Image (spheres, coloured by chain):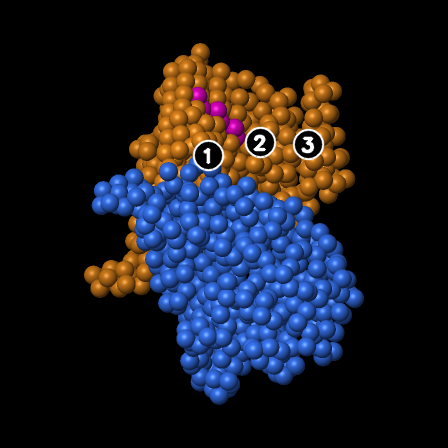
Chain colours: A orange, B blue
Amino acid sequence: MKEQLQKDFDNSIKNLSLSQKDIEIKKFCLDNFIDKGFPNRKEEDWKFSDLNQIIKNNIGELSFYNDQTSTNKVDTSVFVDGLEHNKIVFINGRIEKIDFEYEKKDQIEIIDQSETINEFKNSNSLSDLNNAFTNKCFKILVKKGYQLVKPLIIYHTTNSKIWSKNINLRLNFELDKDSSLRLIDLFNDTSEKNFLNIFYNFELKENAVLKNYKVDKFENKNIKYSFNNIHQDKNSISETFILSSGSNFSKNEINCNLNGVYASAFVNGVFSLNNDKHHEIRSIINHLTENTKSYQLIKSVLDESSKAVYQGKIFVNSDAQKTDGYQLSKAILLNKESEFNAKPELEIYADDVKCSHGSASGSLNEDSIFYLMSRGLSYKQSRELLINGFLLDVVEKITDSEIKNLIKNMIGIKE
Amino acid sequence: MDNRQKEINNLKDYKYGFSTDIENIQAPKGLNEDVIKFISNIKKEPAWMLEFRLKAFERFKVLKEPDWQKPKFPKIDYQDLYYYSAPKSMKDKPKSLDELDPKLLETYKKLGIPLQEQARLNGIAVDAVFDSVSVATTFKDELTKQGIIFCPISEAIQNHPELVKKYLGSVIPTSDHFFATLNSAVFTDGSFVYIPEGVRCPMELSTYFRINASNTGQFERTLIIADKGSYVSYLEGCTAPMRDENQLHAANVELVALDDAEIKYSTVQNWYPGDQDGKGGIYNFVTKRGLCKGKNSKISWTQVETGSAITWKYPSCILKGDNSVGEFYSIAITNNHQKADTGTKMIHLGKNTKSKIISKGISAGSSDMTYRGLVDISSKAKNSTNYTQCDSLLMGNKCGAHTVPYIKNKNSESNIAHEATTSKISEEQLHYCQQRGLNPEEAVGLIVNGFCREVLQQLPMEFAVEAQKLVGISLEGSVG
């Protein structure tokens, strides 16, 4: 893999107009990655999902160079109907379109930050890979007091033109004081055997509100890793919802630093898996100051030989008195081949806190099925009704009613 | 001064902190094949035993000291330890208690274990381990009548080689982790218990461990076998003198329960925790593992961990037999600079297996406490259930309380439920108690005892009283 990395790196550097210093930094990141390789099960954070092995078994040899000189045609049929929205379109890792047609132009700034390197704390070798190979990176700045009228949908589309490729993406967002952004990530893959490595960085200033919905719904044979790094100032709110279903393998990581008082973070997730899919959500909520709050709810329905992993950590600093942290993960195993692993972690250094977590996994409740069947439903209907209700609980946590309905329609959950 | 206050003042300082001046025989410092041969030789062990040790030592040489645990400690120089230390008077083993070195007897009296009389009154059979050697076992005759074997493991190697050979290393093999393998290579003594088929052990069996000599590692090995349909309750207590340097205690405990058998293992661990600035104290790195080998067997661990500078242990159950049950009840209290990383592993292999984990952690002062546990339900363990509850109580903002559970469910017909909470003692509860005339310390003691009640109830009577007192004492000075 080493020669391939070197060769592809030299190729992609050639097409970029970078200063010598930037190249040095990128080289440094590349060397770091070559040194460490893809994360494997020996690393605590990857204990349940050995990415190195997964890539080896599903893709084999990866190549890292993406020719980004030619444009791709934007296929408008993938756009969401019935909801007016702003768009960013990625096709095969290349930004094809940035369109804020519904917003005041002077309130949103798009800054090219391709030279800057992101330093993520609590991160792994994948951030080095990302730093070495991303060639376009934008920062989207929402100015003071501006609240986007319409949601922003980021389309991540891949098509059959690429094969056995690693795609690296990066976006930075800054939400200034009193601003707000609703963001939907929509994955639409018609490609196979690619590894997507996505890094987002969010900076939330005072009173800012971020709502991020990640929807990975369509069946595909790709491997995805996505990392959200969120910094929150005073009074800010972040809400993250993850629907993890379509890809062969997917890992969503969220690192959230609650830096300001009264900041709060919500993470909700749904795993709906079949075949031999393997998905993971890992969240780290760092309560760094007083009076911060976090709430997490993760539910899984696992069929066939699928596997879901939830690793959640609540960290409470010794200054973070009056922290309120809550975490719940529940899983229904429908098949004897399916598997659910959880590691809900608490690390607490302050005494005046209220922190708890719960985790439960098991089969569908036979008594409930019996109850429904005795009222005339078939076994299949009863099962569907119960699963529907089980997942609806999480979807109902979405605070934006417009998007809630959109997601309900997408996954076919009835009320 | 009321009685309680007097008692507290008496107990405030680690009352077991004395050391006894007895001449010792020690193996040369350091760890090598010769030392292992020396230990094996002095114990007059058969060849297979030496082979067992050397095999473990071979493996030990390639192992690295683990470093994933939460409490970090300075590197231990394994060549700077004595691996064998025995009171000199033991060289020609005394035939009866009357021949014991009077100084030894005095030590045990100070510890509250008068081997001769009180044990008889209490109806507890005691095996006392001083430094590395088992010094006395009481009630032997009565137990022998029932066919129960309760003796130092060194004696068992001589007298019951077929049992030891069969079961030693069957739960903790010589190829296990770093400290367990070290123990397999150099273990010196410990207790051996065999309960024959269908026998219900008429009394509680108990071992008392004491580290006396300085720079000594204590490596004892306990092996308990409960044959078909038998029952035994086993107690373990530990103390050590106050010394400035840290001392290592790396014991292995193996339990084997055959069909329909039940083993109840209780520990009150009160090793020297170091002084208020965190100087000295015992490193308690113990491997405890129980195997529910037969159908309908049950193993239950109860532990009260109040001592040691660092406690690092996970008493585990391997639920291999169908319908077997594993239980783990734990209270861990850390104060001053103590650190604990403890919990359990429940490995479900058989059908209809059940496990229950109740863990209560209390941290005060500048201490740090971690619950780390594993519940693993394999794909064959149909219809298994686990219930886990771990609660932590924090006192002051210099201490830490952490929960790291690993939950693996590979079986759709099995259920796992896990709950954890972390909080402090509520002002309302304190206010309520004080309003009724308790002083703040008494109020905290009462609330903490209530918090731990579920676990304390599991302890045998004699231990429960001691444990309750310990809970109060360990938290002295942490309120107000």
In what element is the residue under mark 3?
A: helix
Q: Are marks 2 and 3 on the same chain?
A: yes
At 65% from the left and 35% from the top, the residue drawn is A129
Considering every residue shown, the one lying at the far left of the view is A375
Residue kind at label 1, given as amino acid type: Ser
Considering every residue shown, the one lying at the far right of the view is B34
User: How packed is label 2: few (under 14 Cα within 10 Å), some, or many (20 or more)?
Assistant: some
Q: Is residue A239 left or right of residue A191?
A: left
Closer to the chain start, of discs 2 and 1, is: 2
Which of the two discs, 2 and 3, sits closer to the camera? 2
User: How packed is label 3: few (under 14 Cα within 10 Å), some, or many (20 or more)?
Assistant: many
Q: Which mark is residue A318?
A: 1
Q: Position of residue B172 (x, y in %)?
A: 60, 67
Q: Position of residue A48 (x, y in %)?
A: 55, 51
Q: Main secondary structure of the magenta part?
A: strand
Q: Which mark is residue A29?
A: 3
In what element is the residue under mark 1?
A: loop
